[in-house]
């Protein structure tokens, strides 16, 4: 009898252990028909290590096991994307057609509600809100009323998925709240743009809901969602105020405002993001670099920006310019920088898809006409990709673009482009008749400082 009792206890213990064991892996499978590539990635959002490379079989299927834990995942082939929420112990299957990935993506398996919500969230927001420009054109009172109803609708949509995990629901409610606040804080600048009212200001109290927001919540910032964008906008607004009220240089103003943020992670994140771009455009690179080093507390960021600073120093006035060789010329044949030796060369780096670049075209054409026959060559270098060359040729012809129209050999990766540390366009460069740099970041055609510079040089 005693042996039977011990046996029964042992069986109950084993059964209990089996029942309470939680699988620490996720089974993820799927089938993508008409896929444009066999290479996909499953990325765990906000995780530096949660990346799984997935290769489709010839029939478009795949089967993999994840050990990266419960969380928000992004399934992508770089052109297409599906967001999903996968939980430990779950088994999931995704199907889609590569020709309409977004419209056909469907996930089935263990508790798919959270994933199906994420996969349809943005399309639901767009459907409810309507045209983005028209929404932000609304007058203030109509905007407030509309946004209040929209925010309620977004929350109702989340609640229409009853089986989402509690942790996910709590995080998503926070995300929707911050998305609402982000919509409010963006309204003034977006209304100025879309309603074409550059002097528009929201009324006092419009941003009352933001008064109690903690803008230095590192944990929320690391989630890289609406809170992150809200923080960035909040501090950039402070930069604008400093520039407008104190006349501080806009690039140095960012370093000053960001440098005073009490949270090191958020501070350094905003500083390095600004410095990576601004250091290429500031008028005084030494002063900027010194200001950067005085506020940054990240050794890793400092190494990156120092490397960029040292590279940019080689582009200072009087240094020999990097060269380009045998770029395709719209007029036929190829052209190299050496072809313009003996003349000043004003270079416009642009692309057919770049709105700000195209906005400079009328001013550039005016300057070209003004300096026609002078000792200066106007050279435009497109960084459109190989596949967009026909679009480039057509635009140059249709818009009757003047000067020398060239296209770089390897778009952004072209030696000339990388040598000049160009990471944003339009970019204008001025080189003297001896091939030496006058300005690696010359004034735009729309800026009166360009003609002042030309006059100083006696062009």
Image (cartoon, rainbow, N blue to C red):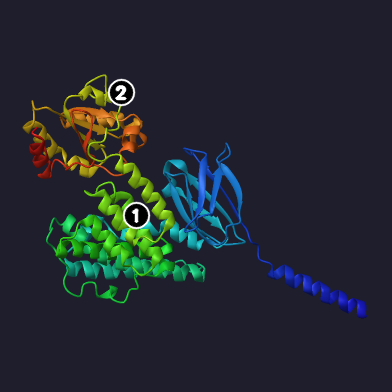
Locate residue 314, reporting x and y percent: 30, 39
Locate residue 119, reporting x and y percent: 44, 56
Residue 68 visible in the shown view: yes
Locate residue 417, reporting x and y percent: 31, 36
Residue 137 visible in the shown view: no
Mark 1 Cα shell of 10 Å, populated few (<14), some (14-19), many (≥20)? few
- Position of the C terminus, as image quadrant, is top left
The answer for how far apart the CA atoms under marks 2 and 1 are is 34 Å
- Position of the N terminus, as image quadrant, is bottom right
Marker disc for residue 273: 1
Instruction: Tell me what residue is drawn at x 23 percent, y 22 percent.
Output: 339
> With respect to residue 86, does 3 lie above or below?
below
* Residue at disc 2, secondary structure: loop
- Residue 187 sits in quarter: bottom left
- Front residue of 416/187: it is 416
Marker disc for residue 287: none
> In the picture provided, is 307 more to the left or to the right than 437?
right
Q: Label 2, on which residue?
A: 326
> In the picture provided, is 431 more to the left or to the right than 419?
left
> With respect to residue 227, does 55 lie above or below?
above
Instruction: Tell me what residue is drawn at x 8 percent, y 31 percent.
Output: 371
> With respect to residue 316, does 130 lie above or below?
below
- Front residue of 188/345: it is 345
Which residue is situated farthest in the bottom direction here? 2
* Residue at disc 1, secondary structure: helix
> With respect to residue 452, does 170 lie above or below?
below
Instruction: Tell me what residue is drawn at x 41 percent, y 59 percent.
Output: 298
Locate residue 373, reporting x and y percent: 8, 25
Mark 2 Cα shell of 10 Å, populated few (<14), some (14-19), many (≥20)? some
- Residue 61 sits in quarter: top right
Dot placed on the residue nearer the N-terminal end, 2 or 1: 1
- Front residue of 446/6: it is 446
């Amino acid at each position: 009898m005693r042996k039977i009792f011990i046996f029964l206890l042992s069986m109950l213990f084993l059964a209990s252990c089996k029942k309470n064991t939680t699988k620490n892996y996720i089974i993820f499978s799927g089938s993508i028909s008409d896929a444009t590539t066999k290479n996909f990635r499953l990325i765990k959002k906000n995780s530096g290590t949660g990346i799984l490379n997935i290769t489709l079989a010839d029939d478009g299927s795949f089967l993999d096991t994840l050990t990266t834990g419960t969380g928000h995942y992004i399934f992508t082939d770089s052109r297409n994307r599906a967001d999903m929420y996968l939980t430990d112990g779950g088994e999931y299957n995704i199907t889609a057609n590569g020709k309409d990935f977004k419209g056909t993506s469907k996930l089935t398996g263990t508790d798919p509600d959270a994933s199906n919500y994420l996969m349809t969230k943005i399309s639901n927001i767009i459907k409810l809100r309507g045209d983005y420009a028209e929404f932000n054109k609304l007058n203030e009172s109509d905007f407030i009323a509309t946004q209040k109803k929209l925010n309620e609708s977004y929350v109702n949509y989340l609640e229409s998925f009853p089986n989402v995990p509690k942790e996910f629901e709590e995080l998503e409610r926070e995300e929707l709240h911050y998305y609402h606040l982000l919509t409010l804080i963006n309204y003034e600048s977006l209304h100025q743009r879309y309603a074409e009212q550059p002097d528009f200001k929201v009324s006092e109290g419009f941003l009352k809901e933001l008064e109690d927001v903690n803008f230095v919540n590192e944990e929320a910032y690391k989630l890289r969602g609406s809170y992150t964008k809200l923080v960035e906008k909040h501090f950039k607004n402070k930069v604008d105020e400093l520039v407008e009220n104190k006349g501080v240089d806009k690039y140095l103003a960012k370093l000053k405002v960001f440098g005073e943020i009490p949270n090191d992670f958020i501070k350094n994140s905003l500083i390095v993001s600004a410095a990576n771009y601004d250091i290429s455009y500031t008028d005084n690179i030494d002063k900027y670099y010194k200001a950067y080093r005085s506020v940054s507390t990240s050794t890793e960021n400092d190494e990156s920006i120092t490397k960029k600073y040292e590279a940019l120093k080689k582009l200072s006035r009087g240094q020999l310019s990097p060269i380009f060789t045998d770029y395709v010329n719209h007029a036929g044949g190829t052209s190299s920088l050496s072809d313009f030796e003996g003349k000043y060369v004003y270079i416009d780096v642009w692309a057919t898809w770049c709105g700000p670049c195209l906005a400079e075209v009328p001013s550039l054409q005016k300057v070209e006409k003004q300096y026609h026959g002078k000792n200066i060559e106007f050279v435009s270098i497109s960084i459109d990709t190989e596949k967009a060359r026909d679009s480039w040729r057509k635009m140059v012809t249709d818009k009757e673009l003047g000067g020398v129209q060239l296209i770089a050999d390897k778009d952004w990766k072209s030696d000339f482009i990388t040598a000049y540390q160009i990471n944003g366009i339009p970019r204008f460069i001025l080189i003297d008749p001896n091939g030496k740099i006058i300005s690696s970041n010359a004034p735009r055609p729309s800026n009166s400082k360009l003609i002042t510079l030309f006059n100083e040089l006696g062009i």
